[in-house]
Amino acid sequence: MAEINVKIGEVTLKVNSDELTQGIEKGEIMIKSDDLIVKPKTDYETLLTNVKNEEYNNGKIKGVEMMIKEAREKHGLNFEGKSMDNFAEAYKTKVLDEAKIEPSKKIQELESDKEKLQKLVQEKELTYTNLLSQQENEKKQNKISTLILGELPKDGLLIGQDDLLTLIKTKAIFDTEGEAIVIKKDGQILKNQSTLNPITIKEWLPEIIKPYIKLPKGGAGGGDESGLNKPGSFAAFNKEMTDKGIKEGSEAFNLEMQKRLKDKTLTI
């Protein structure tokens, strides 16, 4: 019995050709698979958000419970419950029962310990929140880099793609909106002057990367390629480094480039 490969995204399913033909005739094709779960994108994003929130809440609760458990064992307390109030009440009772000093002073010490424990909980919560934010930002920056690299030419560049990407990222601030890049400068979104729509990376890049693209010999202007080999240009710098045997993209190349950019003897 013949089978037909049906591709959904990056997953391939094998479907009986007879069942596929019958489904086409009926106007409905049912594909069953134990290995594939298909959801609308909005449902999937909601699922991810709920999972992250649940992980965050569970991590927060477990962190508090662990600290209370350690404090209970440290002070030899025995009480039900896992909340800060349970610990404080049990500790207060123990202190009043055993202390030979004034109860009010011991209560003050208890309150101080409670505040320290609360502060520690807040610090751990802040650390966890910052970690999540850092992970989201790294994910966003990787996406931006991938989208920019996808628009760069594969051939004819004066410098490597990764070096050019680094230079491009110094020209503006990049953010994402859905699957598109939003380009900002001086806090404002750059816009296409004809449509006033946010300018796309495809529209913005050509002028930015123009100094780093080799022009065909004998092209516009003739003589010196693109006229960029004048002193202080990147092309002149690149040629100078090549003549000295310093490879483009090497540590020595990048250090010298940064030095000249800083003292303004190199213009990019």
Image: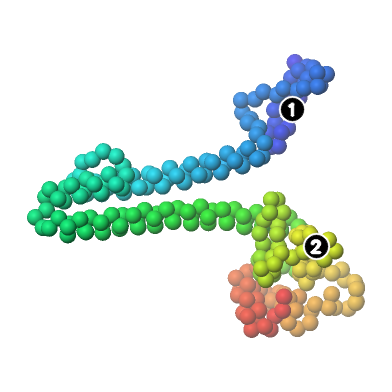
> Quadrant where the C terminus lies?
bottom right
Residue furthest to the front: 104
Q: Position of residue 196 (x, y in %)?
A: 80, 62
Circle 1 is placed at which residue position? 5
The secondary element bearing badge 1 is classed as strand
Mark 1 and mark 2 in contact? Answer it, CB < 8 Å: no
Callout 2 secondary element: loop
Q: Nearer the viewer, residue 247 or 214?
A: 214
**Residues packed near mark 1 inside 10 Å, few (<14), some (14 to 19) or many (20 plus):** few
Question: Where's residue 95, x and y in %?
Answer: 16, 51
Residue that badge 2 annotates: 196
Is residue 267 visible in the rendered image? The answer is: yes
Q: Amino acid at mark 2?
A: Leu
Amino acid type at mark 1: Asn
Left or right of 90 on screen, residue 44: right
Corner quadrant of residue 202: bottom right
Mark 1 vs mark 2, CA separation in Å: 46 Å
Q: Residue at x 23, y 55 (%)?
A: 110
